[in-house]
Image (cartoon, rainbow, N blue to C red):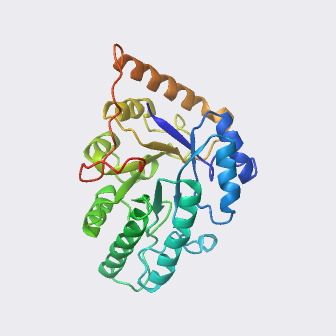
Amino acid sequence: MLNFAANLSMLFTELRFMDRFAAAAKADFAGVEYLFPYDYEKAELADRLHAHGLRQVLFNLPAGKWDAGERGIACHPDRVDEFRAGVEVAIDYAIALGAPQINCLAGISPLDVPQAAARETLVANLRFAADRLEQIGVGLLLEPINTYDIPGFFVSRSEAAIGIIRDTGSENIKLQYDIYHMQRMEGELANTLSKLFSAIGHIQLADNPGRNEPGTGEINYPFLIKHLQMIEYSGWIGCEYRPKADTVRGLDWLASARTQAHAKWEKKHEGGVRRPRHHGRADGRPFDQGRS
């Protein structure tokens, strides 16, 4: 079965942030993700998760001055200390919320810094974060983001992200594959999902153009849902899109996807129960139990 998580930074925005947990549970989401937890008390967030039976699936490392347009600092050589301090803050939240994975936003390429130096900084920062997170049993993700929405973003293609992950030498970093971003940058969605399957730790979705709910654009989501089941993807799928109107009215696609996924699962498991396939590391080895 496929597991869908509500992205509370983009869904249910007609409600106050703390009220979105209840709305997500009412819409039958089992997990939630969002950009950042750091403006809220850890205890209050944990209470909301517990009260509504939700799992904290994901959030991002601190990413600099977001309101000023920064989208991560991991590739900035002059902000390594700030990055490392942010990792420690994220660790506190991950422990409190039970988050199994944290995403790193590489950031916009810094001005007057050679690409090689920025890449070297990113690799070193990822290695540091992965090592620290591994000590508490949490995985690290790296997400490529399209350069139409965020011009100059340092990591914008899946193969580039894989190369950076490989260069860290860490077994605790996986790819966060956002279908919307990668449709805009490279297409070949189904083939790429198959090719990079063992390296993918989390998937996010939205349609294109517009970054609205599936079914509003050019991406064939019924086909992709079927494809993800065929390749036995068992991680979470974050619904990170902007509803065209009211969030709940825009969830018809999800009801259809769940019905499709359930029917395929039942057909596949007629006559017996199979153990679910573990979702492994980039090198094919499984994460430790409870990690992903």
Give residue 105's position: percent from left, percent from top: 46, 65
- Classify residue 223 as left or right of residue 248: left
Indicate the quadrant where residue 118 lies.
bottom left
Query: Compared to 9, does 78 lie above or below?
Result: below
Inspect this view and state whether residue 142 appears: no
Q: Residue at x 55, y 31 (%)?
A: 253
- Classify residue 127 as left or right of residue 210: left
Residue sitting nearer the eye, 54 or 73: 54
Question: Can you say which quadrant of the picture contains the N terminus?
Answer: top left
Query: Compared to 17, does 215 lie above or below?
Result: above
- Classify residue 168 as left or right of residue 134: left
Q: Residue at x 51, y 39 (%)?
A: 4
Furthest-top residue in view? Answer: 271
Query: Compared to 212, does 159 lie above or below?
Result: below
Inspect this view and state whether residue 60 appears: yes
Residue sitting nearer the eye, 253 or 172: 172
Report the number of discs: 0
Give residue 164's position: percent from left, percent from top: 30, 66
Query: Compared to 118, does 272 lie above or below?
Result: above
Give residue 219's position: percent from left, percent from top: 44, 38
